[in-house]
């Protein structure tokens, strides 16, 4: 099962669902596809789509899925990483009215560069990333909280 989540933004991300539908029809994506679509109004014969899913149920889908496809929201990415799930994150783009700016391009690029996700700055990259998913190894998140706290502590005590 593939779990797709588009977050809870007030903007649509129909381009991603259209691409997933296309890849299902092409046979690139196989198996059940469950979608948390948020404000994206989209219907498909290939996917089971929910507007919103409460957190416990969402975490159950994450635990059961083979991998995730998601918008590039930090909360979603971190949830997948903390569940040791493979995730392909696709950036929402301002030029399509999917977000206010292109910060998700930066998020996708950084998390991908660090090896936590397979990132797509454009939906056209999705097929290539899906073909890489079996070889992709999840990387456990390494928190930098202690270093940050130590830095703040040293600044306060100086």
Image (cartoon, helix red, strand yellow):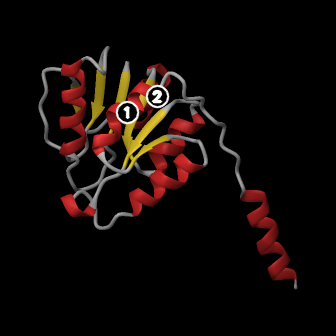
Residue 18, by quadrant, is top left
Return the mark for residue 17.
none
Please give the name of the residue rendered at 57% of the width and 31% of the height, measured from the top-left corner.
83
Above or below, comparing residue 25 to residue 41 in the picture: above
Q: Quadrant of residue 70?
A: top left
Q: Which residue is mark 1?
A: 128
Q: Is residue 131 above or below residue 147?
A: above
Q: Quadrant of the N terminus?
A: top left
**Residue hosting label 2:** 132
Q: Looking at the figure, which quarter contains the C terminus?
A: bottom right
Q: How many marks?
A: 2
- For the point 66% across and 37% down, which residue is it? 140
Disc 2 and disc 1 in contact, CB within 8 angstroms: yes
Identity of the residue drawn at 25% across and 44% down: 38
Element type at marker 2? helix
Query: 8 or 6: nearer the eye?
Result: 6
Secondary structure under tag 1 reads: helix
Front-most of 128 and 86?
128
Residue 104 horizontal/vertical position (percent): 40, 57
Residue 15, x across and y down, in percent: 20, 44
Check the image and report above or below for 34 versus 55. Answer: above
**Percent position (x, y) of residue 105?**
40, 57
- Residue extending farthest to the top is 31
Label 2, residues with CA under 10 Å away: few <14, some 14-19, many ≥20: few
Q: Residue at (29%, 22%) from the top-left corner?
A: 33
**Spatial distance from mark 2 to mark 1, Cα to Cα?**
7 Å
Location of residue 9 in the rendering, given as x and y in whole percent from the top left corner: 29, 54
Residue 16 appears left or right of 152 = left
Relative depth, front residue between 101 and 3: 101
């Amino acid at each position: 099962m593939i779990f797709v989540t588009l977050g809870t933004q007030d903007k649509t991300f129909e381009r991603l669902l259209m691409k997933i539908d296309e890849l299902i029809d092409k046979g690139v994506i196989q198996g059940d596809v469950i979608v948390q679509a948020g404000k994206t109004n989209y219907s498909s014969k290939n996917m089971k789509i929910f507007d919103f899913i409460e957190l416990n149920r969402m975490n159950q889908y994450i635990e059961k899925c083979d991998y995730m496809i998601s918008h590039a929201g930090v909360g979603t990415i971190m949830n997948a990483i903390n569940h040791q799930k493979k995730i392909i994150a696709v950036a929402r783009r301002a030029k399509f009215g999917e977000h206010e700016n292109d910060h998700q391009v930066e998020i996708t690029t950084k998390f991908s560069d660090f090896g936590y996700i397979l990132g797509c700055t454009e939906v056209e990259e999705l097929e290539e990333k899906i073909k890489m998913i079996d070889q992709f190894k999840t990387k456990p998140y390494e928190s930098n909280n202690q270093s940050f706290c130590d830095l703040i502590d040293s600044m306060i005590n100086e």
